[in-house]
Image: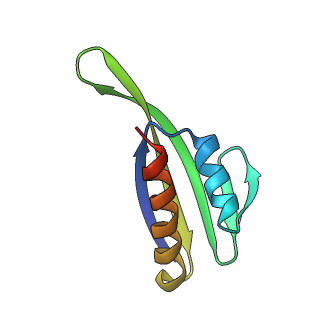
C-alpha cells in the first residue's frame, strides 16, 4: 500500500471532494472519496497566519496499491487545489 499526504490552505474539504469526483472518484462519506485503485480521506484544521488571521488547512491522505496510479492523480488534483486556494 502506498500512502501520500498533502495539505492545502484556504480550500474547503467540500471543494476538494468535488475535484476528486471530477478526476473519477466517488464520494463514500463526508471525508472520503474512492476511485479506481485509490482512496482519499480528509481532515480540516484552523491554522494561524500572522497574529490575527486564521485559514482552514485541509489535509488529504491518498492511498493506493501502486505509486504509478497515485502520483499522477495527486499531481492533477494539486493543480486544481493550488489554483483554487488563497
Residue at left offset 56%, top offset 48%:
42
Against 33, residue 66 (above or below) is below
| Percent position of residue 37, x then y | 65, 78
In the image, residue 60 sits, relative to residue 53, either above or below, namely below
Residue beneath the point at 68% across and 61% down: 22
Which residue: 62% across, 55% down? Answer: 19
Q: Where does the image place residue 84, in percent across and percent down from the top left?
A: 49, 45
**Colour mapping used in the image:** rainbow
Q: Which sits in the foreground, 24 or 86?
A: 86
* Residue extending furthest toward the left: 51
Placement of 32 over or under 63, stated as above or below: above
Q: At which x and y percent is residue 52?
A: 29, 14
Q: Quadrant of the C terminus?
A: top left
On screen, residue 49 above or below 64:
above
Q: Is residue 72 left or right of residue 40?
A: left
Q: Is residue 85 left or right of residue 36?
A: left
* Residue 55 occupies quadrant: top left
Amino acid at each position: 500500500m502506498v500512502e501520500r499526504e498533502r495539505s492545502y490552505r484556504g480550500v474547503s474539504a467540500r471543494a476538494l471532494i468535488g475535484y476528486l469526483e471530477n478526476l473519477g472518484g466517488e464520494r463514500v462519506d463526508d471525508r472520503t472519496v474512492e476511485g479506481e485503485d485509490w482512496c482519499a480521506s480528509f481532515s480540516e484544521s484552523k491554522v494561524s497566519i500572522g497574529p490575527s488571521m486564521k485559514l482552514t488547512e485541509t489535509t488529504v491522505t491518498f492511498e493506493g496499491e501502486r505509486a504509478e496510479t497515485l502520483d499522477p492523480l495527486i499531481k492533477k488534483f494539486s493543480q486544481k487545489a493550488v489554483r483554487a486556494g488563497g
